[in-house]
Image: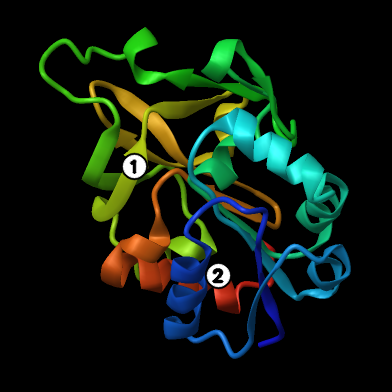
Amino acid sequence: MGATVVVDYGMGNLRSMAKALEHAGAEAVRVTDDAETIAAAERVVFPGQGAARDCMSALHTHELVDVLGEAMTRKPFLGACMGMQVLLEWSDENDGVELLGRYPGRIRHFREHFDVASGLKIPHMGWNRVRHSRDHPLWAGVADGEWFYFVHSYYAEPADPTLVVGTADYGGEFACALARENVFATQFHPEKSHHAGLTLLANFLRWDGTV
């Protein structure tokens, strides 16, 4: 395995992700915001948490938008939590935030679409089952309906349903894993999801970016 880079833009549980990748078998993990290091990496992990506006501001401040766009076109790329959401075009958060726009679609708040009046709390926080929408190399050894850990108030609504490789239910079904070509991204936190998360990360470390 070559070098795996965890993108450091000042947000997210970066060290947790790096430690989980090492536990999953990564031989060399770098946590960095250096564009040249990211460009030279064999595979890129883009974690994140917090607000979409803050995330996009940090990416511009660290001058990472272009190098992330390039990484998404040619090497195994894993996004997690906010690292998945910002791959779409637009978030409804903070009266609207323009995102990276890799894929068409928007990020919406649970209360604007799902039935949360029945007592479901926002944010959606804790363990939930993930259903496979279709096969993917990163699902190898991960059972359909396996439990993963979530923390979020907003969910992804991609315009193209063929992007969706995993769904969960919280007052209604929502997309929690997206994939196309060399990109795989999850709303849940694989680094906090014990055996299932480590299995997914180990699959990513072996993955050549093809489906």
* Front residue of 74 and 108: 108
Residue type at mark 2: give it. Answer: Phe
Nearer to us: label 1 or label 2? 1
Residue type at mark 1: give it. Answer: Val
Q: Residues within 10 Å of mark 1 (few under 14, many from 20)?
A: some
State which quadrant residue 191 falls in: bottom left
The residue where tag 1 is placed is 151
Q: Can you say whether 182 is above or below 40 in the image?
A: above
Cα gap from disc 1 to disc 2, whole angstroms:
22 Å
* Whole-percent x, y for residue 10 in the image: 62, 53
Give the secondary structure at mark 2. Answer: helix
Give the quarter of the figure containing the N terminus.
Answer: bottom right
Say if residue 92 shows up in the picture.
Answer: no
The residue where tag 2 is placed is 204
Give the secondary structure at mark 1. Answer: strand
The residue shown at (48%, 19%) is: 108
* Residue reaching furthest to the left: 119
- Circle nearer the N terminus (1, 2): 1
The residue shown at (80%, 58%) is: 71
* Whole-percent x, y for residue 129 in the image: 24, 46
* Whole-percent x, y for residue 43 in the image: 70, 70
Give the quarter of the figure containing the C terminus.
Answer: bottom right
User: Is residue 158 toward the left or the right of residue 150 in the image?
Assistant: right
State which quadrant residue 167 falls in: top left
The residue shown at (63%, 29%) is: 53
* Whole-percent x, y for residue 151 in the image: 34, 42
User: Is residue 192 toward the left or the right of residue 138 in the image?
Assistant: left
State which quadrant residue 104 falls in: top right
Q: Can you say whether 86 is above or below 145 in the image?
A: above
Say if residue 96 shows up in the picture.
Answer: yes
Q: Which mark is residue 16?
A: none
The residue shown at (49%, 63%) is: 138
